[in-house]
Amino acid sequence: MTVPLLSLRGVSKRFGPVQALSGVDLDFNAGEIHAILGENGAGKSTLMYVLDGVQRPDTGIILMNGSAVAFASPRVARRAGIGMVHQHFTLIEALTVAENLALSLPQPPRWRFDATVTAAQAQALARRIGLELAPPEAPVSGLPVGARQRLEILKALAGAGRVLILDEPTAVLTPQEARHLFAMLRQLRAEGRLVIFITHKLREVKEVADRVTIMRRGGVIGSYAVGAISEREMAEHMVGEVVPAPARVGQRDHERPAALDVSGLSARGARGIDGLRGVSFSVRAGEIFGIAGVDGNGQRELFEVLVGLRRPSCGTVHVGGRPLTAFTPRAALAAGIGHIPPDRHHEGLVLSMTIEENLLLHRGILDRLSWHGLLRRAAARRFAADLARQYAIQSASLDAPARSLSGGNQQRVIVARELAERPAVLVTVNPTRGLDVAAARAVADAVIDVTCQGCAVVLISTDLDEVLDLSASVSVLSRGRLSTPLTTPIDAERLGLLMAGAAESS
């Protein structure tokens, strides 16, 4: 009988009152691609952190080739042949792309750093994988999110020996880049290596994995051959109940009035580079307009201009036929523009504040619940409790800090707060990124519901599935320019090529 390359026996981990892992028994074999599925908070990331040496288990043992091992740190795990791409980046921003890669290359320089040699190694590795690498001399601090994610993947593949762990590796990749990555993973499998990856995309599991393990509430529900389980069954095992299919948005209704008109919008990006170049589009009431693209192509600039965080260098924005005369958050709110920001931790929530306080963090909400500048506490409490029930925010208490919530529940707090004011226009960026299937569908359904009330939605997303599932029409933002809109049914392959910059139109 073949001994598994990597095994866990009785592994448990607790963080205060939260039992993150509970007696996990699991085997991983050499020469396989093994997917890990589960709701937010199911224990997936904690399990991977234990394998990577970031966390030490409270009880249980880890075995490699049948022998017990202990990973006191990621460095020890790396020496044992385990490399990991974390969901939250571990790059050193003060260093360049080449310098970050040099820290993970199999044969680092002994005496001095040779940037030319390292750059050549990095480019060779990038070509082998089929991913676009930022210039080796570029500082990481100036890279967009997508470029950082690709650099993390390159780092892990450069240093990994027998085991590669990937946490949501395709979140910011185009379909073509994802296929290149999957081809690389299959090559690693053919070489006898073990690939473990966490994903919320059931299609990815069916496309590339050999086996899938499903987790719930810190335990293992089961491990299955991918060919023996359907996407619907995987989703049901994850949440413990039947998951309804998401509603779909209908065709674009040209009879409805335009709620948002953007014309000739340009804005400066990082380091003085043009982030937006003459972007124009119109979104009608009750419509979801999708803007697809790889991070770093102007998404951040467009979001910030629309919500009043950045002044455009030229162009106009009209909401309900009225011009937006000042590009400030106050002016955007007054015009009826709501938003779901791209980073829920840094832009959507104050993690140290309570859930109730975060649900109230909106000028319109605070104005409604205040009397002569003083918050009516009882009314505020009832309001927050009603929102928590309406959006199924799961928490022990509304007085708990927002950081205690799972990612899905944190996103529900933001969505509940922003939609409570019934915006005329909603600007949302990657609203379901990092969410499990149930939380993602809850957020998507909330966005669809608000369109039924006449809201116009601008959906800016790097997730092609999200854009295709929700949008009535889609454009691609590439190098600051917006393509001509495509209407349903939309060819995903063509959209992916546009995202990669293969074809552009102004």
Image: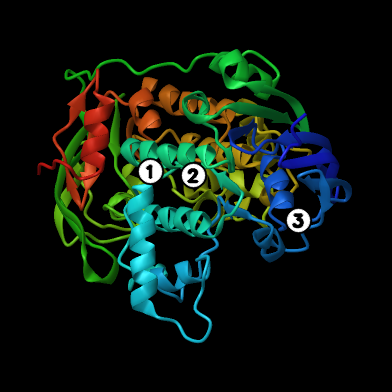
Quadrant hosting residue 137: bottom left
On residue 169, the disc is 2
Residue drawn at 17 percent across, 38 percent down: 281
Q: Secondary structure at mark 2?
A: loop
Left/right of residue 211 with respect to residue 262 in the rendered view: right
Compared to 135, does 9 lie above or below?
above
Q: CA distance from mark 2 to mark 1?
A: 8 Å
Residue drawn at 28 percent across, 57 percent down: 327
Residue under numbered circle 1 = 173
- Disc 3 marks a residue whose amino acid type is Gln
On residue 55, the disc is 3
Counting other residues with Cα less than 10 Å from the Cα at mark 1, is it few (<14), some (14-19), or many (20 or more)?
Answer: many
Q: Secondary structure at mark 3?
A: loop
Q: Position of residue 192 (x, y in %)?
A: 58, 41
Q: Are marks 2 and 1 in contact (CB under 8 Å)?
A: yes
Compared to 179, does 305 lie above or below?
below
